[in-house]
Image (spheres, helix red, strand yellow):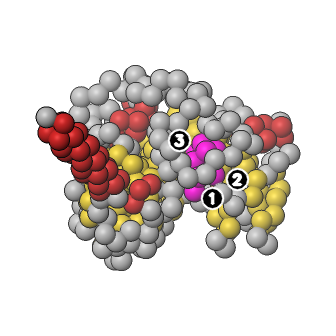
């Protein structure tokens, strides 16, 4: 009986160790899987273990692929409603944030030019990109994956993953290919309409049933908390402080709106990487733009401070 009990004890201990080992192997394989949501991650430029599952399935957040537009006089937007504004090829269009919160991507055209409008609610980042890649137009969707809490797009032709805030493909056949950023305003409807009275406005007739009057992320912008981990953080500003950032010669600089507020509506003249800049901040619309000395707009990104720093931990920062 003694030996029987001893053997049972040894067997039980061995089984627990085997089960623990199997579970550990499963967890490690899950964390470092070469595939997530059906996307092949054998060829990536970012750490696989930093690619997070955002929750929704691939295309669970549906892109708008056949956008409809209204005239400015036909929209019921409130003057203070936020929009992403793009002016290209003589055409002005406004994309209400309350719609983008639910879709994140609009595949559109400005004349003959394909353009993809992207918005990540978690990072507060809205960027329009030229959708002509290697001479071919690309249609993008929402992968359901995140990197540094930021949306990973995918193109439906090659299923490569694209990082919005890295402006490039980070996995798949097109890894390393860059996206060309277009000048994109993140401003109030009132401000955009004053600048472009003939603007078109994305219609709520998207083909999907959504309550666009409701914010799906209530309280998120005010909270210091993040839903997903990021690689680097910095406490100089509130994590959700709005900043406008730009890249020149591979270097980055950010201008926090709380610092620009101190200018009391005056233009800021600055120099970065040997280039003279003019930063215009409008307190009334809580929006900023960056120009060169000849009044040409320089593409820049309006987003939350935590997101900008996560992607650019070596960024320079303007302080009043």
The location of residue 284, given as percent across then percent down, is 69, 31
Mark 3: few/some/many CA within 10 Å (<14, 14-19, 20+): many
Compare marks 2 and 1 and give the one earlier in the sequence. Answer: 2
Q: Which residues are magenta?
A: 302-312
Q: Quadrant of residue 163?
A: bottom left
Mark 1: few/some/many CA within 10 Å (<14, 14-19, 20+): some
Compare marks 3 and 1 and give the one earlier in the sequence. Answer: 3
Residue at 42% from the left image edge and 73% from the top image edge: 177
Q: CA distance from mark 2 to mark 1?
A: 10 Å
Compare marks 2 and 3 and give the one earlier in the sequence. Answer: 3
Residue at 72% from the left image edge and 34% from the top image edge: 283
Q: CA distance from mark 2 to mark 3?
A: 15 Å
Which of 28 and 309 lies nearest the eye of the viewer?
28
* Image depth: mark 2 or mark 1 in front: 1
50 up-or-down from 235: above or below: below
Residue at the spot of label 2:
254
Residue at the spot of label 3:
124
Tag shown at residue 84: none
Residue at the spot of label 1:
312
Q: Quadrant of residue 101?
A: top left
The location of residue 298, given as percent across then percent down, is 64, 61
Q: Is 138 part of what is drawn in magenta?
A: no
């Amino acid at each position: 009986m003694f030996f029987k009990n001893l053997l049972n004890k040894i067997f039980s201990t061995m089984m627990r160790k085997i089960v623990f080992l199997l579970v550990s192997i499963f967890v490690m394989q899950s964390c470092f899987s070469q595939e997530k949501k059906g996307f092949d991650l054998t060829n990536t430029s970012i750490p696989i273990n930093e690619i997070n599952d955002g929750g929704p399935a691939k295309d669970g957040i549906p892109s708008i692929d056949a956008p409809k537009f209204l005239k400015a006089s036909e929209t019921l937007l409130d003057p203070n409603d936020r929009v992403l504004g793009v002016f290209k090829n003589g055409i002005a269009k406004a994309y209400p944030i309350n719609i983008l919160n639910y879709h994140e991507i609009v595949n559109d055209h400005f004349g003959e030019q394909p353009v993809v409008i992207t918005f990540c609610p978690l990072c507060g980042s809205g960027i329009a990109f030229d959708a002509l890649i290697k001479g071919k137009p690309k249609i993008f969707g929402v992968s359901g994956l995140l990197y540094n809490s930021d949306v990973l797009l995918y193109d439906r032709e090659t299923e490569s993953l694209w990082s919005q805030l890295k402006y490039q493909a980070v996995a798949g056949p097109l890894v390393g290919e860059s996206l060309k950023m277009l000048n994109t305003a993140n401003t109030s409807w009132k401000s955009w309409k004053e600048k472009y009275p003939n603007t078109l406005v994305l219609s709520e007739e998207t083909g999907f049933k959504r309550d666009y009057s409701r914010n799906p992320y209530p309280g998120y912008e005010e909270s210091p908390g993040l839903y997903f981990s990021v690689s680097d953080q910095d406490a100089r500003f509130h994590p959700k402080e709005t900043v406008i950032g730009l890249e020149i010669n591979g270097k980055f600089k950010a201008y926090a709106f709380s610092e620009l507020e101190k200018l009391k509506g005056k233009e800021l003249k600055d120099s970065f990487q040997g280039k003279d800049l003019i930063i215009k901040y409008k307190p009334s619309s809580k929006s900023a733009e960056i120009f060169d000395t000849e009044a040409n707009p320089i593409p820049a990104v309006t987003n939350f401070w935590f997101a900008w720093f996560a992607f650019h931990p070596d960024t320079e920062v303007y302080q009043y």
